[in-house]
Structures are given as structure tokens and as C-alpha cells.
Image (cartoon, rainbow, N blue to C red):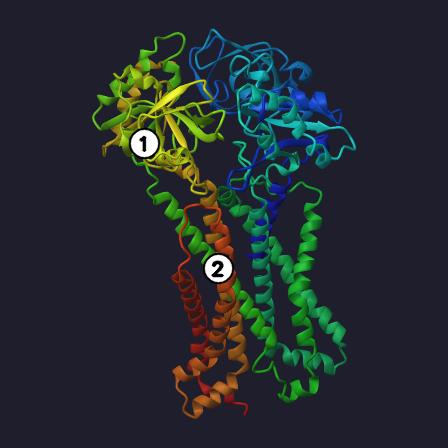
Amino acid sequence: MGIATCLLITLYIRHELSFDRDYANGDRLYRVVQVYLEDNGTSGKSPWMEAPFAKAMLKDFPQVEQTGRIMPADLFYGAGSNEVRPEGRTEDTYEEGFTYADQSILEMFGTTMIYGDRAHALTEPASLVLSKRKADKYFPGQDPVGKVLYLNGDIAHPYKIGGIMADPPENSHLNKYDFFISLAGHELWNGEQNFWRANNYPTYALLKPGVDPKQLAGKLVGLFQRYLAPQLEEAGTPDVGSIIKRCSFELQPVKDIHLRSAGIDAGLPRGDIRMVWLFGAVGVLILLLACINFVNLSTARSANRAKEVGLRKAVGSPRSGLIGQFLTESLLLSAISIVLAIGLAWLFLPLFDRMTDTKLQMPWSEWWWLPSIILTAVGVGLLAGWYPAVYLSRFRPVEVLKGTVNLGGRRSGLRSVLVVFQFTTSVILIVCTLVVYRQMQFILNSKMGYNKDQVMLIQGAGTIDTANYPHYRLNAFKNELLGLSGVKKVTISDFLPVSGGKRNQNSFWKDGRSKIDPRIGAQNWYGDPDYFATLGMKIVKGRSFLRDMASDSSAVIINETMASKLGWADPLGKLIDRGGSYKMHIIGVVADFNFETVRDSIGPLVIHRGDWATIVAVKTNTKDMAGLIKGVAGIWKRYEPQQGLRYTFLDESYARMYADVQRTQSMFTSLSTLAIVIACLGLFALSAYMAERRRKEVGIRKVLGATVAQVTGLLTREFVVLVFISIAIATPIAYWGMKLWLQDYTYRIGLGWWVFAAAGLMVIGIALLTMGVQALRAAMANPAGSLRAE
């Protein structure tokens, strides 16, 4: 069990450490990260750069060989997800994994092409590159280069296929992207490609050989001084010099992106190097527990082998020969164990994949597999077998054959250390499991300022209103949904407080203060008049949007945090703007709600009226959900006959935000259970050892009148003391570790004393149960059997 667990964790660590290691120029490939100093003195990091940054970096720094950008933000049309239709077909298919990309991205990452020329695959405007798996899906057995795809039913703007790339490898941080849309000739808005005041592009740089990345990163702020500062000054931004001084840059090696991007949000799934080493440490601990058990079992059997050792020594066997014999036995048991462990690991690999969200494979054909197995068998055999071999081989033949050999002192220092180590580990893992579970339940069940229950999210509704149809069709679709039994409210918005909702960070000022005050960074969202009622949000001041109020087109509703940032106790009727370009009057204040994970505090938020989106949220109140879905599908079919109904639920999207925490919970629960089982096996071995060593003592005590309860207490007292010592050692360690882990969450549970008490009581109960079996057997045994030879 110990070797199988360690093997699975080793496969996981190997997979995590393999990310982005196979690029031809990987040692010179970096991602640009901007570091900025916040108003409160903390620093933040962002990989999102300005549109002209890559071009300016290549132009101004000869140390740079090549630069490239991607633009995956689903805030902008085409990125994220789309409804896809090849030319000549009538049905749309939903696809994720779209990003805009420069032609140079294909070259920098050495993308392998199946069809088409890599050097020109994205050079033409409105061209795209597909992965092989998507090409096989839409053009099976064909070379689709030059063929056309339509996105979201927009036949007026076709996309020409410029090439087919090999499927992104599983261990690439870009593996979620199956569609690269060309950035050639593309602008997110007019003049955007020369605009230095918006950050939408993760940017990569290939440095020339021998260039020091740290030295170059220190010079990149010069780009802001040359290009950003003039645009800020032209816009009337105050104290531009101070803004620039608060910025700096890092060049992050691409091979570090997957595991070392804590605090850097690029919208990509990523791992955490801390979790990698944590699971590695737990795997080693479990293997050590298993080896300790082997030591204890071997020494517990010492009485049975003492005469064998004595006889062998009496007929001339040297101690080295005995040590060799016992080590050979240990190596043989290790070899058998590792064969069984490989079978267990292979059997449980699918379950382990689900727990870790990976797709691991047993490396049967790898050249290093067999040598590693042999080395592991030898290493574990020697580690577990060395002490028992030395211990058993030191018996003196005269004492053994006379029956006076002492099979271990009443108090063994090594035995005490081993049991304390085992149960300290168990207590720590139990505390971690309890804390992670409670924090997870707190997250999933807390009131976050909105109601996530029974809210159906209809996806892909943006194609109902396109250039081919009048704008009112989406609202007509909404009104028909309201006519269904079981539907309470319906809202149209892409900006939702869960994973998958769009985000748009903008700068705001009090009206007329943009050239005086520092900016207030806030999320800039859109929702229709039913947005707040559908999601169960509370308007604490003012009102919501009104459908027939024309002036609401320039009205906004802000959250309490934004009102606090503005310094207004009563913001109703007051004006804010985005640098003078657009004035908005405040008509309401919504109670704060979490629109990011609870790792982060609630930020400022501004919500405008808007009723065009790709998501329609339906608040339901029915027990017949299947019937309601059938009714929704019928309405959908009339509006979108070329596209199947896709839907999720808001609480499911909410849960996906914390999938990593759920995986951590599953891992800790499983590993804690395994550690307890192994520790119990160790305690069982120690109990057997003590019962065997004190067999005659117990017999004499029973002859002299000792009761079963007295004998049982005698045999368990020493171990109970050691368990209490383990609890005392484990409690501060577990407290420190969990307090550190909880600091990642702005909203978190408290570390009550009862958590540690519960863990301690669980361990004491398990220990007493395990030891009690052996102690009772020894206490209830007939003393005549142990005293017959006396």
C-alpha cells in the first residue's frame, strides 16, 4: 500500500514537473509579467499587456529575437467559445478553446503542423489554425487548408483555415486552445493596436542566446516611459511619473508558468508547486510509515527467530552471513511488494486521475521504468530490513539456547520514536482533512450575496440576435420563457458571479476629477432590468433599472465597495465617468456580493443596463425540472433550429470555481485514511511485540490474581502515553500549517480548539481499539501455556 501510494504520487509529480519542457528554444522563452504596487502597499502581478507592447519590445531591445501575443479574453468576440459551422453545413456545434494569436506564436513555440505552412498559417486576416482533433471532427480524412468556418452563424464574416497543427500536448500550459485566430489586421476597437491604456494580451518573448532575463526585465519599464506616459498625459491623468514608478516587470520562464504562477491570473488552468511538494512529502511519509511497520513486525517476530540465530551461530555462521540472510529476506519481500504495488497503482490510477484532474499513464515502455523499479525494490528492502537484520543477528547463542536472551528492554527508545512519528503524522493529516472539509463546506454553503440555487444558465443565446436578425428576438425569447410554469424570473447577461462569467476591468473617477484624483479600478458589467431579482441580489439604496425609463441607458448601479471607494455615503444621483469619455449617473447601490472566489476580498463594481448577451439565466421554482427543461428546449428550437440547447446551473458553475479545493479535500481524506490504516498496522505490530515479550510476565500476574482489565491496562498504558505525546507534538504543527493555508481565503473558518480535540480523540480511539485486540488476547490467554517450561 505504501509503495503503491508513493508510485501514484511520483507519477503525478513527474507529470506536473514536465510542463512546457519540450520546446526547442525553451530555455530562452519567457512570458512578460507586469508587477504593480497597489495603493495599500501590496504588489500585484499581471500577464496582460498592452496591444503595442510586444512590437515595441522587439523594436527597442536588440536582445529580443522574437515576440508574440495571444488574446484569449472571452470579453471580446471570437475568443473563448463559439458556435462553429463548416461551410456547406446547416448545424452549429459549440466549441471552446478559441484564442487570437500572432503568427509568431506558432514559430516561437515550434508548433508542429499536420497541414499547411507554419510560416504563413496566421499571416492573413480572418484566418485560423485548428488542432488535428478538431480538424478530424469537422473534416475527417481531408486536408482542410483553405476551407471556411463560420462562427456564431455569422456568414458575412467567414474564417479561412490557414493550417492544421498537432494536438497541443497535455503538458503544455496552452493545451486548452484548439483554435488560433489570426491577429493580423484585427483590432478589438478602432485604434486599439496603438492604444497603451488597455491590457488584453498575454505576451511572450524569445531572447537571443546569452541574454540575462533579469537585466532585460529591469529595462522594460522604459517602454512605459516612452509610450504609455505620453498617452496618459494627453488624457490628463495626474501624477503620471508616480504611476510609472510603481510599475516594474519580470520575465517568467515558460517552463515555470504551470506551477509557479500563484497570484498571476491568465485565465489558464494551472498547478501549484506547493501542492506538488506537499503531496510528495505525504507520499514519502506514507512509505516511511510502511517501512516502520516492517521494522516493528520483524522485531515482534524476534522471539520466534532467536533460537534459529543461536543455532546458526553455534554451528559457525558469522554475523555478516546472518545479516546477509535477513537482508535477502527483506529484499525478497520488497520485490514481491513492489510487484503487488504496481498492480494496485494500475488498478487505482483512474480514481487517482479523477482526484487530481490529470490523465496519467503507467510508463510501461519508458527506458527508465524497469531500472527505477529495481532500484526502488532494493532501496525499500534495505531501508526496511537493515535494522531488523542488525538487531536479530546480535543475539548471543549461549543466552538464546539457555533461554535467557532479552528480546528488547521494557522501554525501547527506538520503538517510542517510531510510534510517536506514526501518530504525529496521523494527527496532522486528520486535522488537515477536517479543516479542508469545513472550509469547503463553508464556501459551498455560505451566503455570497446572491442566490445560486435553481438558476438555469442557457448558453449560446447570442446567436438568437445577430446581424441577420432584428435585436428584439432575444427579448422575445426571454418573454416566452417567462410564460413557462415553474419560471419565476429571467435575465440576459454574460456577467455572472461564477466561473465562466465575463470580466471587464475599467478605471472610474468622480465626474470632472479624472485629472485630479487617482483612478478607481472597478469591474464594469452589464445586466438587464431583471438582473438583480433573478440572481437574488439586494438593492440597499435607490432602485434597479426600469425597462421603460430612457434615461437608464446612461445609468449605473454600483456596489457598496464602490460607494466606499468613491467616499459617498449617499451616491444616488451623483455622476461618475471613465476619464471624461462617458458620464454615468448612479441610480442604485447593490449589497456587496462575491463575484470572485472567496480567496479575494470583494472589489468595486459598476453595472450598466444592457440586454444583449450569450447567456440567459432562468430562476426556477419547480420540482419537475425535467419537464421545465423540455419546455425550454421547445422554445429554443423555434428560435435556434440550427443549434442544440446547452444549459448548466449556477450552483454547478459556482462549485467549479473551487474544484481545486475539492480535489485537495479528496486527496487529504484519502491519504489520511491510508496513513491511519498503516499506523494501525504499525500499532498492531507493536502490540504483538509487547504481548510476545511479556507473555510469561502476564502469565505470572494472572496466576497471582491479576484481572483481565488490569493486564489489558498494563499492556496498553505505555502506548497511550506515546499517543498523547504525538498529539502534543502534532497540534502546533497542524495549527501552523492550516493557519497558513487559510490565509489564501479572505473569508474563512476559524481554527477552533475542538478540531484538534476531535483529531486527538479519533487517534486515541483508533489506538485503543487496535491495541485492545492484542492486549485482550494476551490477557485472556491460559497462563499454563506460557509457564509450562518454568
Whether residue 667 is situated above or below residue 299 in the rendered picture: above
Which quarter of the rendering shows the N terminus? bottom right
Q: Which mark is residue 589?
A: 1
Residue 262 or residue 572, whichever sits in front: 572
Give the residue type that dot 1 points to.
Val
Which quarter of the rendering shows the C terminus? bottom right
Q: Give the residue displayed 69% in from the left and 16% down from the top.
A: 119
Question: Label 2: which residue?
Answer: 735
Percent of width and height locating residue 134? 54, 21
Which element type, helix, strand or loop, lies under badge 1?
A: strand
CA gap, disc 2 and disc 1: 40 Å
Residue 264 or residue 545, whichever sits in front: 545
Residue 277 or residue 494, whichever sits in front: 494
Residue 690 or residue 560, whichever sits in front: 560
Q: Is residue 4 visible?
A: no
Which sits earlier in the primary sequence, circle 2 or circle 1? 1
